[in-house]
Image: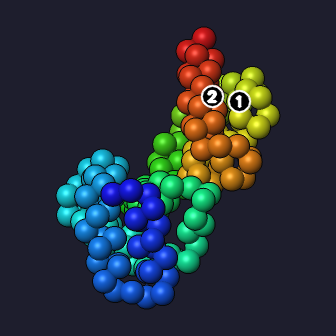
Amino acid sequence: MADEEISALLGRVVLRDRDAFAALYRQTSPKLFGVCLRILKDRSEAEEALQEIYVKVWQRADRFATGQASPISWLTAIARNHAIDLIRARKPVANAIDEAYDLADPAPDPERSAAVRSEGRRIDACMEELEKDRAEAVRRAYVDGLSYQELAEMFAVPLNTMRTWLRRSLLKLRECMER
């Protein structure tokens, strides 16, 4: 389906045209389902997510700005972000960090405490080797749990640039930690 057709359908959805919404669903749901399935890796969860995504589309169709992005890219971004949010909701980041460092244990043994502190200092030292904005992006992504899109907007860079920043930063961190 051409971008113009999808844009036209979205325009009609803004006007609460149920037939246009049904047509939009028929034309775009296979692609969006594929995005959900690839991220969530569970068919039933992807199907449920897809329904929630189309509720969002129905409610937010007026936010699509014709000419700024392709309509299928806009829909795909909604699907991807929703699926990522579902993954994050499975297990909060703070709990994962607590478990990784055993912070929930009120009285860790002294040897383990020293090892955790030492590892923390190594990570901090390696983070200091990154450019300031790259280090901040890594912290926001992997500690605060921000999405690539949120980070791209926060740092005023294109989405692919943010992906590149994070990938390269993680490679540098791995290299540093292996020394």
Q: Which residue matches tag 1?
A: 127
Q: Disc 1 on helix, strand or loop? A: helix
Q: Determine if residue 89 is in view.
A: no
Q: Nearer the viewer, residue 162 or 129?
A: 162
Residue shown at the point (39%, 70%) measured from the top left: 53
- Residue 17, by quadrant, is bottom left
Give the residue at the far top of this rendering: 179
Tell me which amino acid carries mark 1: Met
Q: Position of residue 3 (x, y in %)?
A: 44, 58
Q: Determine if residue 75 is in view.
A: yes
Q: Position of residue 67 (x, y in %)?
A: 60, 59
Rendered view: 123 above or below 25: above
Give the residue at the far left of this rendering: 43
Circle 2 crowding by C-alpha within 10 Å: few under 14, some 14–19, many from 20 = many
Q: Quadrant of the N terminus?
A: bottom left
Q: Earlier in the sequence, mark 2 or mark 1?
A: 1
Rendered view: 32 above or below 132: below
Is the C-beta separation of discs 2 and 1 under 8 Å? no
Tell me which amino acid carries mark 2: Ser
Query: Viewed as shown, does residue 32 lie left or right of 119?
Result: left
Q: Quadrant of the C terminus?
A: top right
Q: Nearer the viewer, residue 26 or 120?
A: 26
Q: Position of residue 22 (x, y in %)?
A: 29, 78
Q: Which residue matches tag 2?
A: 169
Query: Viewed as shown, does residue 74 lie left or right of 2?
Result: right
